[in-house]
Amino acid sequence: MNQMSKEIVPYSISQKELSLQEKVGQLFMLAAFINDTEAAVQKTEQLIREHHIGALCFFHSRASAATNFEGKKAVVHNENSYDRLKQLIARYQKAAKYPLLMAMDAEWGLAMRIENTPQYPYAITLGALQNNSDLIFEVGQRIGLDCREAGIHWNLAPVVDINSNPENPVIGYRSFGDNKKSVLSKAEAYLKGMESSGTLNSIKHFPGHGDTATDSHLGLPVIDKSMEELRQNELYPFQELIKKGGDSVMVGHLLLPQLDDTEPSTTSSKIITGLLRNEMGFEGVIISDALNMHAVSKKYLEKGKLEAAAFTAGMDMLCFSEHVAEGIERILNSAPENRIEESFKRIWQLKEKVFMNKAPRVNEAENPSDLNRTIAQNTLTELFGNPEKKDEIKNATFLNLSFAPNNNNIFSKKLEDDYQQRAWELSSQMAEIKLGLGKHQNVVLAIFPPTMKPKNQFGLDSVLLDFMQKLIAEKNVLVYLFGNPYVLDILGLQSNSNAVVAYQDFVEFQEEAICHFKGEMTATGKLPITLKTFQP
């Protein structure tokens, strides 16, 4: 990934050359799967040719995308996904009469969808940074450069939802935190970084998906707040960023009864046209969240009806439509020509921005390791209820415990090497650990949760969690958490407990955590969310 891929030669096709039917086709963004079968790829090529599709959104595979709601399909690892992506982009562009916009959810880099590509910290990790907007700018810029190099023009990021609900199953770690001003400032730095690379952006998920405990892939979340509350909180980052411009806003699948008690935001003219377009003054492209998500797809069973309803409500780009032909036909039969022209022109302007203007000259994206290390050094967060007890551990014998079933646990191995304290793994040595527990009062517990999402206690089974809670209650425990800080809420931590949040399991974050344990660095990060239970 050293050489920048060649941009498509700028085209000078006049908007007038497209028929009305072709213009409607430009409003559709198909889902494209990198690890798809040849038959499925040919079907996508056919859809592009026949319906003059405007954009594609790439996912790793059908098993990893929003179609696999219940997780019944296994995600197959493919070492060559990146090369396959570039091959497919070339094929799909060749099939298109008018150049396609290539999009992807690359919130923390191409690694969100593609193996063996640069991965940067999650938004919640960046949320722990204090007065380091330059680092977030660099993350946005490098992600943008990586996208450009791969042939992706449109990164559907960042998330500007204010995550105020610890039980949120779909936003959580993808948000910069629960403070509206922090979310705004960090999102703005990320956006400026992406813009400097020439990559399109999308702020999401309007009008705010943070305060919900429902996954919109599975059901329809309800945000039942007054307009005053929404303007003060959920809408705040959207409104402020809209003032500064922006390429697109993605509308999430949410029910806001105070605005529209019958239609979800996806198909609500009151929310899309009334609030976002007219009241808040957004002039760019309004794009839907994936239209196959159960929050809306289950309500519109008749093919093409959802696409037409979303368009009528004010949507410009219809993402992840599974009924293209029917959607185009319904829009052509029901929408006024001037309404079609309005959306088409907004999308065409994005294409002109990508294909007719030279991308800014920026140094090529580099290996992310140095940047990730610097972020680790500035995000590590101490939560010490009893610092003296923490210091006792380093000066005495301690039990070196970890739960890291899926990780290369450098942290505990380094503690073993440097302090001659054997590393014990809870996932495989629980019985032995329990037998020797009585000999130790001091414990270093490194936790690598299997998932960043709160479902099923972040992947911590009840037996393991009970053991950890009892350990924390009875021993002098110093926790190092390499994952979602909300995990601390289920550990049974007390006001005098001691914990360090490292947020990521990257090698760089583990190595910096070791430096912290040794006293070689000071933790300067601040928790970007409010915990329910642990208030040291």
Image: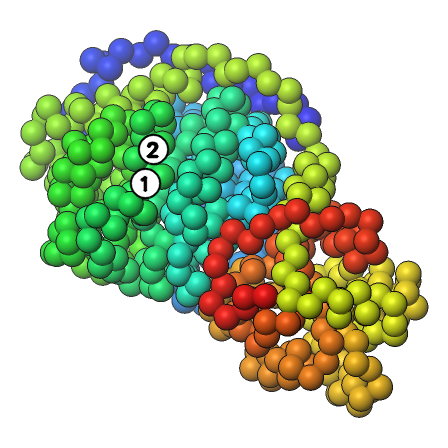
Indicate left or right for 385 with 165 as reference: right
Which element carries disc 1, helix, strand or loop? helix
Q: Three-letter amino acid code at disc 1?
A: Tyr
Q: Point out residue 67 in the picture as x, y percentages from the top left corner.
A: 38, 56
User: Can you identify the residue that label 1 sits on?
Assistant: 236
Q: Point out residue 58 in the picture as x, y percentages from the top left corner.
A: 45, 41
> What residue is rendered at 60% in x and 83% in y?
466
Q: Three-letter amino acid code at disc 2?
A: Glu
- Closest to the observer, 415 or 395: 395
User: Is 375 placed above or below 393 here?
Assistant: above
Which element carries disc 2, helix, strand or loop? helix
Indicate left or right for 439 with 294 as reference: right
**Cα distance, mark 2 to mark 1?**
6 Å
Indicate left or right for 337 with 289 as reference: left
> What residue is rendered at 59% in x and 30% in y?
134
> What residue is rendered at 76% in x and 87% in y?
434
Q: Point out residue 382 in the picture as x, y percentages from the top left corner.
A: 66, 57
Q: Please report contact status of discs 2 and 1: CB closer than 8 Å, yes or no.
A: yes
Residue 299 falls in image quadrant: bottom left
- Closest to the observer, 157 or 66: 157
Quadrant of the image for the C terminus?
bottom right
User: Can you identify the residue that label 2 sits on?
Assistant: 240
Quadrant of the image for the N terminus?
top right
